[in-house]
């Protein structure tokens, strides 16, 4: 994964995401990688890949060098797009593998972009669960085999596994009434909104509905 420089957005449009995915497909093919899950957020991305050869750095350099140049050209910018070198963590335990599969699917929900993982089109969740066709570079079969030998049953188990993680996250969250109990004044309200968005992972829509304000007001308060 990589984050945007100073945590700024690195995907500003669908064209940006198509650029990234198109080059990722080329890199996976050229370097013989296996890509088992992915998610493109706004200011970062996650890739779950296997590299049979010791060519991770070479492939990531090709991917990011291409994408960052395209990004700067498209928006007439200069300088760094990503925040330093990409981060990579080796998966050595089955528990870690399962955690990565679920985390990648739920990242858009945790980030407040959608309320359900199937609503986010820029991740592997829809392809693995059979909601949408799989891109050429994504090895859906590898991930499904973790959940069973029959594709239909494996997809159902995958959906159950991800949904279970979503329920666990929601169970651990502090409720909105508890978050805003006793909160008065604009400064305290804005602070509570930021906690609700970024620590408790409520969406702007959920917060706006509870407080009876607009989503744009919630978004502005989140940035202050």
Image (cartoon, rainbow, N blue to C red):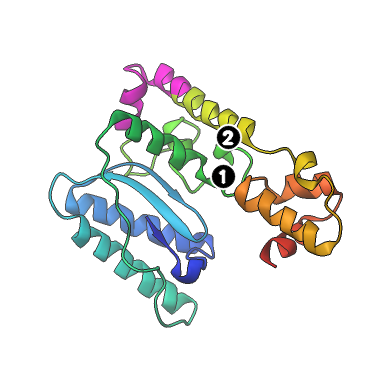
Q: Is residue 140 positioned above or below 112 on the image?
A: above
Callout 1–callout 2 Cβ contact below 8 Å: yes
Residue 141 x/y as whole percent? 31, 30
Seen at 51% across and 68% down, the residue is 8
Would residue 117 appear left or right of 93 to someone viewing this image?
Answer: right
Residue 130 x/y as whole percent? 46, 30
- The image quadrant where one finds the C terminus is bottom right
Q: Tell which of 179 and 146 is nearer to you.
A: 179
Q: Which residue is mark 2?
A: 169
Q: Tell which of 16 and 172 is nearer to you.
A: 172
Number of callouts in the render? 2
Q: Which residue is mark 1?
A: 110
Q: Tell which of 79 and 150 is nearer to you.
A: 79
Does residue 141 appear in this view? no
Q: Is residue 206 magenta?
A: no
Which region shows up in magenta? 140-157
Measured in 3D between alpha carbons, the distance from the residue under mark 1 to the one under mark 2, in whole angstroms, is 9 Å
Of marks 1 and 2, the one in the foreground: 2
Which mark sits nearer the N-terminus, 1 or 2? 1
| Mark carried by residue 138 | none
Q: Is residue 172 positioned above or below 152 on the image?
A: below
Seen at 50% across and 54% down, the residue is 41
Would residue 91 appear left or right of 75 to someone viewing this image?
Answer: left
Residue 161 x/y as whole percent? 47, 25
Does residue 99 appear in this view? yes
- The image quadrant where one finds the N terminus is bottom left
Seen at 56% across and 44% down, the residue is 110
Q: Is residue 71 positioned above or below 206 on the image?
A: below
């Amino acid at each position: 994964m990589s984050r945007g420089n100073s945590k700024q957005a690195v995907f500003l449009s669908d064209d940006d995401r198509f650029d990234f995915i198109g080059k990722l497909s080329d890199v996976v093919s050229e370097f013989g990688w296996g890509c088992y899950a992915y998610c493109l957020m706004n200011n970062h991305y996650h890739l779950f890949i296997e590299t049979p050869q010791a060519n991770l750095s070479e492939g990531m350099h090709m991917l990011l060098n291409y994408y960052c140049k395209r990004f700067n050209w498209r928006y007439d910018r200069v300088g760094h797009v990503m925040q330093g070198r990409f981060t990579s963590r080796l998966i050595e335990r089955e528990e870690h593998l399962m955690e990565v599969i679920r985390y990648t699917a739920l990242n858009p929900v945790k980030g407040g972009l959608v309320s359900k993982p199937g609503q986010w089109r820029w991740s592997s969740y829809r392809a693995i669960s059979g909601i949408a066709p799989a891109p050429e570079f994504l090895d859906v079969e590898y991930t499904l085999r973790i959940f069973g030998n029959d594709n239909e049953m494996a997809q159902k188990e995958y959906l159950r596994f991800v949904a279970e993680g979503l329920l666990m996250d929601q169970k651990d969250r502090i409720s909105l009434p508890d978050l805003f109990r006793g909160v008065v004044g604009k400064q305290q309200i804005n602070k509570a909104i930021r906690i609700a968005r970024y620590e408790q992972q409520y969406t702007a829509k959920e917060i706006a509905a509870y407080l009876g304000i607009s989503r744009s007001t919630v978004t502005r308060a989140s940035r202050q």
